[in-house]
Image (spheres, rainbow, N blue to C red):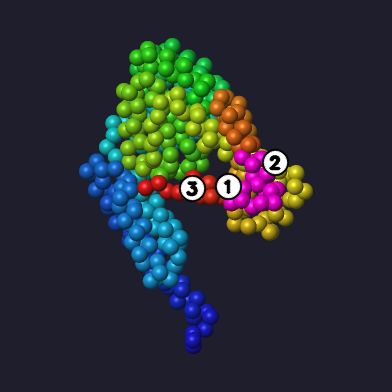
Amino acid sequence: MTDSVEGIRWKIEEIDNEILDLIKKRMSIAVAMGHHKVDKAMPVRDLRVEEQVRDRYLARAKEVGISDAAAIELSALLVRESVEAQAKLPRPMKPRKVLVVGGGGAMGQWLCRFFASRGHEVKVFDDLPGGEFPNVKLAKGVKEADVIAVSSHISATAEMLRDIFKLRPKGLVFDIASVKSPIVDVLKEGADQGLLVCSIHPMFGPSASFIFARNLIVCNCGSDIAVNKFMPLLNGTGANVIEMPVEDHDKIISVVLGMSHALNLAFFGALRESGFSHEELRKVSSTTFERQMNTSGSVARESPNLYYEIQHLNPHNREMLEKLIEALREVQQAGSDDDRAHMIRLMQEGRKYFEVKQ
């Protein structure tokens, strides 16, 4: 090879620029497709097409000299950027008057930005001063609103819903509480009174820029009309919407949040007692340990009050945590046994659990 190191690097830089130019061209075409979807009232996401894109990349992975994993990651990245660009395009929608109760908190602010970005008129009711959206009295806000979103602490949500229901709102009312047991009776009472009430759980935090491919649970509290009125608010976002009765919410969330939060709390608690600093551990970390450490580190920086309420107020958490403790004891026993059959069985059962069911 006669080229110098600098010459080779220059060629790589040229190729990188060509790749970026092609990405720019691809994004331009994706936006054009987005406008077509808007005009034809088509959904932003088409999972069949996304799978076809992935398969095209996989088919050529070996030819271009990259791994299958890299091909999947690259196709997913480009699809995500394309869909997010399409999701930003405004869709014809009648502007609504939205009241965000608790609009000064982190998720309340997220709701304000989300609805404002979609062309709705947003006001807030909150004791916290300031903010870019008008702060109004509760009675006035409820009377005027087409949509009322309640973003209070879980422990305060039931009382806030009662205050709102006393004002006989004409618009859609929903909360975003992470635990529904403390409010399920209030929600169902509201629906029984003929109010348009449903319950939402965004499975993401306020740092989410977009909700493309993110999960959002919609709970039916007894008003099908309310659920049907909520759904168009998500048009064009590409969110994964999961519907369920409100009574079913907390049991599955005891696994998704209750157990996973507890596991991470226990993990960084054990690290703290290990005698090693996190800097020392990172220097020798494996791939698995690094991932777990990053996840637990992010949990440690979350709101302790929210995490307490998620643990304390979900009645299904105790049962789930007992299962977690039992599973840890079994792992401890399997590692202590002289016969490796126990550990092999645990690993095989885990592999079977995670098999993709056709």
Q: Amino acid at mark 2?
A: Gly
Percent x, y of residue 23: 37, 61
Left or right for 118, reference 150: left
Residue on which the image places disc 1: 346
How far, Cα to Cα, is label 1 from label 3? 10 Å
Residue 184 among magenta residues: no
Q: Amino acid at mark 3?
A: Lys
Q: Is residue 290 left or right of residue 182?
A: right
User: Which is nearer the eye, 287 or 172?
Assistant: 287
Q: Are marks 2 and 3 in contact (CB under 8 Å)?
A: no
Q: For marks 2 and 3, give the one nearer the viewer.
A: 3
Which stretch appears magenta?
327-344
Residue 286 visible in the shown view: yes
Which type of secondary structure does the marked residue at label 2 adopt?
A: helix
Which residue is pictured at 53% across the width and 80% down the height? Answer: 5
The residue that label 2 is drawn on is: 269
Helix, strand or loop at disc 3?
Answer: helix
C-alpha span from label 2 to label 3: 30 Å
> Considering depth in this image, is 183 or 63 the residue closer to the camera?
63
- Mark toward the start of the polypeptide (1 vs 3): 1
- Please tell me in which quadrant of the rendered image residue 146 appears: top left
Instruction: Identify residue for label 3.
Output: 352
Graded by Cα atoms within 10 Å as few (under 14), some (14 to 19) or many (20 or more), the crowding at tag 1 reads: some
Say whether disc 2 or disc 1 marks the residue closer to the N-terminus.
Answer: 2
- The secondary structure that most of the magenta stretch takes on is helix
- Please report whichever mark, 2 or 3, sits nearer to the chain's N-terminal start: 2
Residue visible at 49% across and 79% down in the picture: 8
